[in-house]
Image (spheres, rainbow, N blue to C red):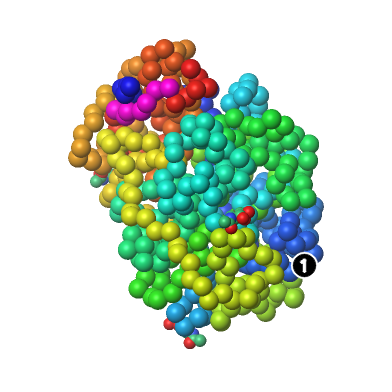
């Protein structure tokens, strides 16, 4: 049975989770350092490092908070954020660092555990540590699906038995092909690094690598031997139900970094993640909280403006981009002369060899293999327009961008242009096959045709379109089989957001029937 569904644009909604985007425009360093995996030693592979300048190979919480700067925008955030870097391997065998565009963004999503939404989000305790992803992984193995296969709709992952932590971790990686002149891809849509030809053909603005961290915590351990076992993903990766034993909900951390793969357009070669991974399945990221817990808790509790902008959190002190960029860490002497940026010669830092899989890579930098491996490719899948109104495989809603506003990087905050309340956008469903990318900034619709008491939140998703991050709240009425998608949060200018119809099968949400 197909049922009609309405999509409504709202400027605000109560009881809805907020988020903020922590900009870290500076990179404090790029080096083979990893205090979680290789404490006190030189790490296997190179990382791009953001946050506190106190970062070092055996960093303590005190090192982080006592440092004199952070490369992130909020000066109270002395955390460390790090992840592998991306290199290009030229046809002649020499490697070159790909330019990282704009630093890094760390989203803090304040999503509650759907098991009990009365429970508050708990701030990261001081010195909380964790890793997302698995550097050794070299295959995609969720539900026997090929990496090329589209994800099933998120709400049925549990029914399909695709919610083991390993499954969710693989779906928590995204390689977002950027072309600001085309319709954007949804977040966490593609779980592998596209091959070079694909990037050349479609991704004129590079690749945005995304990774979602687990956000359900066992409530007691600041860390665990593998830096993972004390946390777990909710069953929708970003959102959903926390598994048993992990019933303390933390802010959901989501890193985004943009790499200018387009700078090598037309050059023969391949992209390689610094851990010797050309497919991206082994992408991962690390975090150590350098917040003061009490302060972060206050931010979590009170900074609930839907804009996602750190500027709208009154307790945050925000420093200039120049300050963020000028913050750097001290690289230990043993690594000071290691070439990690620019043309670095014929090996990755640490002489890491490419491991092709499908078996796991090892830490030992295995001998070079002569086999080639097929990098999954797929035809370009531009974002669905609002009029097409489809959920993406990953459950992320795609949206048509305002095609005239090409952005250089995703972090430039546009000048505020608050919608005038005198020109309310019509919320009336206007499905049309021709994308009309211009619509007035969404003001609260005159009449929101939703009686909230009849609806349950099924899930919440986020979509990033250029600089605009929107939160999509999917509500479903059990009796009337109607889904209302409520979109809130505008970072201005608000683009091409239109009401539309979408269709979906009822009955997939077993939990709510
Ligand atoms: C390999 O090719 C790149 C790109 O043309 C060039 O920059 C680099 O110097 C070359 N390396 C060697 C060892 O020839
Ligand atoms: C949220 O932030 C916007 C600016 O981005 C501001 O206009 C609005 O008043 C804020 N709302 C609340 C509830 O603080
Ligand atoms: C796929 O990767 C996982 C995790 O590294 C590994 O356990 C499994 O053996 C791999 N599968 C194959 C077919 O090699
Ligand atoms: C895109 O947005 C800008 C700023 O909001 C607006 O001036 C322009 O008309 C829009 N262009 C299109 C093609 O929608």
- Residue 324 percent across, percent down from the top left: 59, 57
Task: Inspect the magenta stretch and tell me whether residue 272 lies in it.
Answer: no
Magenta-highlighted residues: 501-507
Image position of 304 with respect to 149: above or below: above
- Residue 230 percent across, percent down from the top left: 73, 41
Task: Name the residue carrying label 1.
Answer: 41
Image position of 427 with respect to 151: above or below: above
At 53% across and 76% down in the image, what residue appears? Answer: 370
Tell me the quarter of the image containing the N terminus.
Answer: top left
At 65% across and 53% down in the image, what residue appears? Answer: 286
Q: For mark 1, give the secondary structure.
A: loop
| Total numbered labels | 1
Mark 1 surroundings within 10 Å by alpha-carbon count, few (fewer than 14), some (14 through 19), many (20 or more)? some
- Residue 444 percent across, percent down from the top left: 36, 25
Q: Is residue 457 left or right of residue 364?
A: left
Residue 238 or residue 164, whichever sits in front: 164
């Amino acid at each position: 049975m197909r049922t009609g569904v309405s999509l409504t644009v709202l400027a605000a909604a109560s009881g809805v989770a907020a988020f903020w985007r922590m900009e870290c425009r500076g990179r404090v360093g790029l080096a083979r350092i990893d205090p979680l995996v290789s404490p006190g030693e030189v790490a296997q592979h190179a990382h791009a490092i953001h946050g506190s300048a106190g970062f070092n190979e055996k960093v303590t919480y005190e090192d982080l908070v006592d440092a004199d700067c952070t490369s992130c925008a909020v000066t109270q955030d002395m955390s460390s954020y790090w992840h592998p870097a991306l290199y290009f391997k030229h046809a002649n065998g020499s490697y070159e660092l790909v330019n990282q565009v704009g630093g890094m963004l760390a989203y803090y999503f304040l999503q509650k555990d759907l098991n009990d939404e009365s429970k508050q989000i708990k701030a990261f305790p001081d010195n909380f540590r964790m890793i997302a992803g698995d550097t050794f992984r070299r295959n995609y193995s969720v539900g026997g699906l090929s990496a090329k296969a589209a994800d099933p709709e998120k709400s049925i992952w549990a029914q399909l038995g695709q919610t083991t932590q390993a499954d969710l971790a693989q779906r928590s990686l995204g390689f977002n092909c950027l072309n600001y002149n085309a319709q954007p891809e949804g977040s966490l849509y593609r779980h592998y690094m596209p091959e070079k030809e694909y990037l050349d053909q479609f991704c004129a603005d590079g690749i945005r690598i995304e990774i979602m961290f687990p956000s359900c915590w066992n409530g007691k351990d600041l860390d665990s031997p593998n830096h993972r076992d004390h946390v777990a993903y909710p069953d929708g990766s970003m959102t959903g139900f926390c598994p048993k034993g992990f019933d303390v909900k933390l802010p959901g951390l989501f890193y985004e970094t943009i790499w200018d793969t387009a700078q090598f357009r037309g050059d023969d070669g391949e992209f390689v993640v610094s851990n010797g991974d050309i497919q991206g399945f082994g992408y991962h990221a690390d975090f150590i909280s350098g917040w003061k817990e009490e302060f972060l808790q206050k931010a979590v509790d009170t900074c609930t403006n839907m804009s996602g902008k750190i500027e709208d959190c009154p307790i945050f002190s925000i420093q200039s981009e120049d300050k963020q960029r000028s913050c750097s860490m001290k690289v230990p002497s043993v690594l000071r002369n290691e070439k990690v940026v620019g043309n670095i010669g014929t090996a990755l830092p640490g002489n890491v060899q490419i491991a092709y899989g499908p078996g796991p890579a090892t830490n030992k930098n295995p001998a070079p293999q002569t086999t080639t491996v097929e990098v999954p490719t797929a035809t370009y899948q531009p974002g669905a327009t609002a009029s097409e109104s489809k959920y993406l495989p990953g459950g992320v809603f795609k949206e048509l961008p305002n095609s005239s506003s090409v952005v250089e990087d995703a972090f430039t905050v546009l000048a505020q242009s608050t919608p005038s309340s005198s020109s309310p956008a019509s919320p009336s469903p206007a499905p049309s096959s021709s994308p009309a990318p211009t619509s007035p900034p969404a003001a609260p619709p005159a009449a929101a045709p939703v009686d909230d008491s009849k609806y349950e939140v099924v899930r919440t998703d986020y979509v990033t379109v250029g600089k605009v991050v929107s939160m999509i709240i999917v509500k479903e009425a059990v009796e009337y089989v109607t889904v209302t998608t409520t979109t809130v949060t505008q970072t201005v200018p608000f683009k091409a957001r239109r009401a539309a119809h979408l269709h979906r099968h009822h009955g997939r949400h077993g939990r709510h029937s």
